[in-house]
Image (cartoon, rainbow, N blue to C red):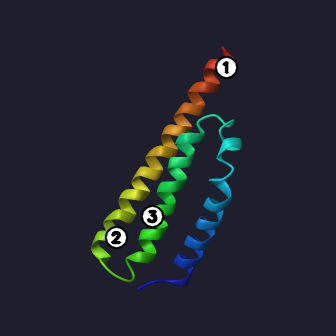
Amino acid sequence: MMQESEIITLVLGLAVAALLIPNYSQMKRFPGSRILLVAFLMMLSAWAATVLEGFFWSELFNIVEHFSYLLSTASFAAWLFFMVRRRGRAER
């Protein structure tokens, strides 16, 4: 069963993606922007899978949802590791 909050989260995520992707050239100046973009897109795919599992193929989309959350978390952790390591080099 789908909840209203899941749809709202997906709509807000799509709105952010609609603003983020066309402006990616500006985001490139931010260190590790590719990794951060992958983390966001994986989170967005998890939100989409959450909504889709309410309509059909619930088991498949549930697996996709949780795998996307895993990839998003791993990407974000990799970005954090990259940033901490980069900062450590700058302080030397």
Which residue is rendered at x = 50% and y = 59% of the image? 43
Q: Residue at x 47, y 52 (%)?
A: 72
Identified by mark 3, the residue type is Ala
47 up-or-down from 89: above or below:
below
Mark drawn on residue 24: none
Q: Which residue is mark 2?
A: 61
Name the amino acid, label 2. Phe
Residue under circle 1?
90
Q: Which residue is mark 3?
A: 46
Q: Position of residue 56 (x, y in %)?
A: 33, 81
**Structural crowding at the residue carrying mark 1, measured as other residues with C-alpha within 10 Å and reported as few (<14), some (14–19) or many (≥20):** few
Task: Give the residue type that dot 1 points to.
Answer: Ala
Residue that protrudes farthest toward the bottom in the picture: 1
In three-dimensional space, the C-alpha distance between marks 3 and 2, rounded to whole angstroms, equals: 9 Å
Spatial CA span between label 3 and label 1? 35 Å
Q: Secondary structure at mark 2?
A: helix
Dot 1 or dot 2, earlier in sequence: 2
Q: Nearer the viewer, mark 1 or mark 2?
A: 2
User: Where does residue 18 sit, x and y in percent of width and height?
Assistant: 64, 62
In the rendering, at what x and y percent does residue 11 appear? Answer: 59, 73
Rendering coords of residue 4 (x, y %)? 55, 83
In this view, the residue in front, 54 or 19, is 19
